[in-house]
Amino acid sequence: MKVLQLLGLLTLSGSMAAQMSYFEVGVMGGVANYYGDMTHDYVVADESHFAYGGYIKYNLDHKMGLKFNVYSGTVSAADANSDRANLKARNLSFTSPVTEAAFTFEYNFFGYRPVEFKQRYSPYVYAGVAAFHFNPQAYYEGEWYDLQPLGTEGQGSEYFPYRDKYRLYEFAIPFGVGFKWALTERWNMGLEYGARWTFTDYLDDVSRTYVDRNLLIESNGIDAYNLSNRSGEYLGGEPFDYGNNDWRGDPTNTDWYMWLGITFSRNLIKGLDEGFRTSAKDQLGCPGPRHINKVKKKKT
């Protein structure tokens, strides 16, 4: 008898654990933005671009979850947005697609229990690791140019052997905050903001010093020089004559990119109804949770 009771308890505990942990799949739609050598202490809303992606999450329990996402979007910036005369004269700009794959740990402050709406909303935080691809480009005289192959800061030049061409695949530290709520037991909606601290200072192709005009043209070509020093377009004449010791960017800080979006996801939990349950009582024509009352038969 005791053996049967023990087996029953183990079965019940296993069933409860299965209900607490479950997979969740979802999508994200929103905007991407950037912070770096061309943002000048603030993020420009006009440089926000559409971003999208999908994710799969394993909810370990009502507090913690592990999430894998693939997000994609475009980031951009321009010195024309600055209110500083020296940066307007620098006149650089860039646009870059960004695609990331990230693995993060999520923590719900209130706990999140969509089943029977035991806890139907919660703020949360997350952090983890990410890998991403980018490719900075610039528009010049009617054409788009990929900037990394040009070596606008002397990368790949024999005159600067310590300046290697930067990689277009890099790593980042993702972290962020969000708020989610249960539309039904199966469907969730949320709002999420996340920042990515990258391991590159070349998301915008700007980091170190200019290169002397003649040296850069000789080693990397005229396109490298034209895309490196664009002050002439702003001045309406000859560009500034920058040398090897004139700073073009700030190498002491790496670049960032950010996602802001709305999430929509589905809980993969067996045995749940598809209906929109809102409370224990029916509201707005939506059925509430069903309860079965057991009635003992009278003996005759």
Image (cartoon, helix red, strand yellow):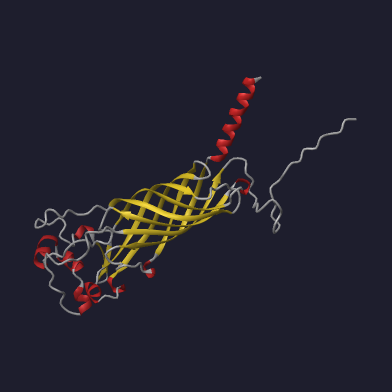
Give the residue at x 70% y 57%. Answer: 283
Query: In the picture, which quadrant includes the C terminus?
Result: top right
- Residue 247 spot, x, y in % from top left: 17, 66
Which residue is the extreme one toward the bottom? 236
Image position, residue 218 (x, y; %) = 9, 63
Q: Residue at x 20, y 71 (%)?
A: 230
In the picture, measured across the screen, residue 122 lies left or right of residue 213, that is: right
Residue 96 place in picture, x, y as percent: 31, 61
Q: Residue at x 63, y 27 (%)?
A: 8
Task: Point out the residue furthest to the right here.
Answer: 300
Q: Quadrant of residue 77?
A: bottom left
- Horizontal side, residue 103 vs residue 119: left or right: left
At horizontal 14% and vertical 63% (from top left) the residue drawn is 221
- Quarter of the image for residue 229 reads bottom left
Q: In the figure, 244 relative to 134: above or below?
A: below
x, y (%) of residue 177?
44, 55
